[in-house]
Amino acid sequence: MVGVGTQDSLAEAYDFVADYGTTSFLMTWDRGFDSWNHFGVRGQPAFIVIGRDGAVLGGWYGPLDDAKLNEALAQG
């Protein structure tokens, strides 16, 4: 899992990581919204599941839903 910060400042992204303890996965920073444009993201939170071959397996907006995540991962 990789988190991509985009909307806030880099300092706010660091604060998010510190506040929520997102140490179990990599957090990256995209100041130009390139990742949003590439995947067609229009709001947050958004989740995109990408298979080992780079194909998009699924995606959704809203809170992380274990059932949706597990379903998408089972496809890849």
Image (tube, helix red, strand yellow):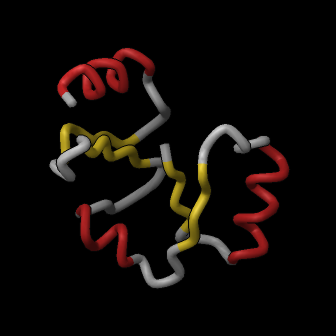
In this rendered view, identify the residue nearer to me: 65 or 27: 27
| Residue located 43% across and 24% down the image | 65
Percent position (x, y) of residue 23? 73, 43
Residue at (83% x, 47% y) in the render: 19
Figure check: 12 above or below 61:
below
**Residue sitting at x 19%, y 38%:** 57
Write the residue at 16% across / 49% down.
Answer: 55
**Residue 61 position in % (x across, y down):** 36, 43
In this rendering, the answer to whether 31 lies above or below 23 is below
Query: Relative to 27, is 57 on the left or the right?
Result: left
Of residue 62 and residue 5, the one placed in the foreground of this image is 5
Could you tell me which quadrant the C terminus lies in?
top left
- Outermost residue on the front side: it is 52
Q: Is residue 6 above or below residue 76?
A: below
Left or right: 53 as drawn, with respect to 13: left
Across and down, in percent, residue 31 comes to: 53, 81
Number of marks: 0
Q: Is residue 34 above or below residue 68?
A: below
Q: Position of residue 71 (x, y in %)?
A: 27, 19
Q: Is residue 22 left or right of residue 4?
A: right
Q: Nearer the viewer, residue 54 or 18?
A: 54
Q: Residue furthest bottom?
A: 32
